[in-house]
Amino acid sequence: VQPNNYSTFYDDQRQNWSIMFESEKAAMDFSKQVCIAKCNSSSVLDSVLCQDLLLGEGQGVEAGDSLEIAYTGWLFQNNGLGQVFDSNVNKDKLLRLKLGSGKVIKGWEEGMMGMKKGGRRYLIIPPAWAYGAQGVAGRVPPDSTLVFEVELKRVKLVKECSGSDGQSVSSRDSPAPSPVPNSDGFAAD
């Protein structure tokens, strides 16, 4: 996915192709179908499939960053989108989470890594990375593959401080090592 409704890909002969779409919506719909096709063509889905729909801007998020997210989740049924089982899109509250804290399913933790503010991503999450054999009573049947469309609305990096010129500077820009997570899974402040 590239800016201005433009996508590139390689074929199996490693030739580069590009497509320009008439609208942002057409480009996103195409990208969603590519992700679903990847899922349907894999014999066993053993990791999270991620497909960027919109790239966003700024730094990619890492473990320890605080995020605010708008999302919709579907059950993956009959090789495509089934019913919506959860969404906060038409609600006033965004989902807030600290990436890497273990407060959301493993597939989200993995699938959100590297996203940028304003970015949108499609995630297809196998049962082992979601709710597994137990499911969620009344909403997610056992052993369900899930599809999420997530939009990263706000980001607060692990450590931000103000540089001498007043610009926000992330600790990631320096050679200093990242904070080591303590035993409770949160990054040390």
Image: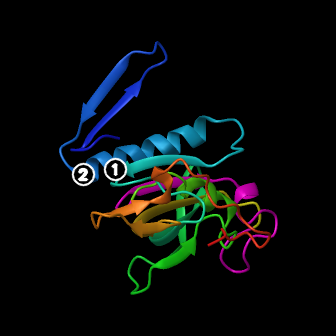
Alpha carbon separation for disc pair 1 and 2: 6 Å
Q: Is residue 3 above or below residue 104?
A: above
Dominant secondary structure of the magenta stretch?
loop
Amino acid type for the residue under numbered disc 1: Met
Taking the image as shown, residue 68 lies to the left or right of residue 5, namely right
Q: Is residue 14 above or below residue 85?
A: above
Residue in front for this viewpoint, 156 or 132: 156
| Residue span colored magenta | 117-141
Residue 127 point in image, percent of width and height? 72, 57
Q: For residue 94, what is the image quadrant?
A: bottom left
- The answer to whether the residues at label 1 and label 2 have Cβ atoms under 8 Å apart is yes
Residue 156 visible from this viewpoint? no
Q: Which labelled disc corresponds to residue 24?
A: 2
Q: Secondary structure at mark 2?
A: helix
Residue 123 visible from this viewpoint? yes
Residue 27 point in image, percent of width and height? 29, 46
Residue occupied by mark 1: 28
Residue 10 point in image, percent of width and height? 42, 23
